[in-house]
Image: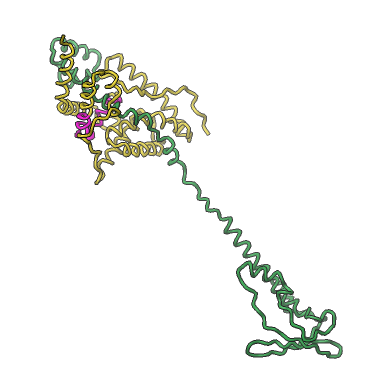
Amino acid sequence: MPSQPEIALLEPNTDRSVPGVNSPAAVASNRTSRELEAEQDRVLIESAQKGDKLAFKQLVQRHQRRAFAIALGLLRDEQDAREVVQEAFLRVHRGLDSFHGGSAFFTWLYRIVTNLSIDLMRKPGRREAELDESREIDEADIPLLSRIDGADPLDVLRRAEIRNKLEAALAALPVYHRGVIVMREVEGLSYEEMAEAMGVSKGTIMSRLFHARQKLQRALAECYAEEVAPNVRRQAP
Amino acid sequence: MSVSREQLMRYHDGDLPEAEAREVEAAIEQEPALLEELEAYSELGSFVRAWDQANAGKLASFDVTDSVLAALEPPRARVHSLLPRIATWVSLSAAIAAGSVLVVRSWSAAPMAPPGAGSGESAEHGELAPPTASAPGLAAVLAAVGEELPKLPPATIESVDFGSNTGEVFVVSTDSSETPVVWMPDDAEPDEDNEDRSESL
């Protein structure tokens, strides 16, 4: 059995607070960590290609949560997303020999996840998870971010409302648009990485991202207006 | 310099080359509308990430490692062990073989040792012992294979003195008839049929 690569494997970037604007420093940092991650993946893939099960296990452990985040963003159903991620890793394993490292492992994985998610959504009879707009706001549902930065209960409720509206708006987006939003805003992928992951040109990615953002901004227009008002109110003596 | 929306978005996403980015920054300083648009992108990004935070719990507990690895295992060789079946067949075969040997031997031995013949004494109206007595193993073998030893009809034995030899006359009774059998042992001549039968085993 091939020996386990003796490198200190860093967990992939699981920091969910990807900066909104890629300042040059952030881009460099992001790129550097991704390059290091890609190198570690390459070592693991080489071992896995030789039959090292432990190496493949590490690949799964390193990437499963991000793959799940993508699938969940696309499918909006936890069980479906789980099945897609499992199937994606099985396909990765079957295709290990065909992976020559021309692209990053995670873009390959994301592409499989995206394709599987789209296939699943196209299945006749599949109904997307329904959004219950009228549901009561549960404190547990409110993102931690909202709870810690907004002591004002009205702020908390407003953010919960924004989240519901955003969820409805995301649900209304075509899957490709939803995909680029999740990959860009949540996972922090570059245009090139998204293009690889979705198997389209960089231009197509830019177009999709632009239109997806426009739609979301329109859907959240009220929220934008309200976002300014409380700040003005607070500043008033 | 006029900045296109594509350029502004690429600037926001850090996709512009350094020189072009500087140009956009210069344009933003002169046009507040561009700054607003840029901030709108940032705001949307923070909304999306906050929305995603709701999945943090699901993500933290998500782990399909075991199920993926289990699915990769080759289907377990079905341990439909043939051992029990083999053992049954071996036992059965052995039982049949043993049974055959015993049957053959009983066929060859029965005439050699009729009741009373070995001692030369007459058995007055004695009952012929059932074959199970002379071949107890056969019953066990047959019992093992679920067969019963056939019941032989009772036989009456009459001892007759033929001069140089002593013989017996059997009267084998069945439900419908009685068959007399005259038994004259001849130790000098081997029973060729029986010999052949034994060798064939």
| Magenta-colored span | A164-187
Q: Is residue A169 magenta?
A: yes
Residue at x 33%, y 30% (from the top left corner): A107
- Asked whether, in this view, residue A6 is left or right of residue A165, the answer is right
Residue at x 32%, y 32% (from the top left corner): A110
Q: Main secondary structure of the magenta part?
A: helix
Q: Colour of chain B?
A: green
Q: Quadrant of residue A210?
A: top left
Q: Is residue B106 magenta?
A: no
Q: Quadrant of residue B136?
A: bottom right
Q: Residue A211 at x, y = what percent?
A: 17, 28
Q: Residue B160 at x, y = what percent?
A: 81, 89
Chain in yellow colour: A
Front-lying residue, B11 or B100: B100
Q: Residue A11 at x, y = what percent?
A: 41, 24
Asked whether residue B189 appears in the rendered view, the answer is: yes
Front-lying residue, A29 or B85: B85
Q: Is residue A132 positioned above or below B158 on the image? A: above
Q: Residue B33 at x, y = what percent?
A: 13, 15
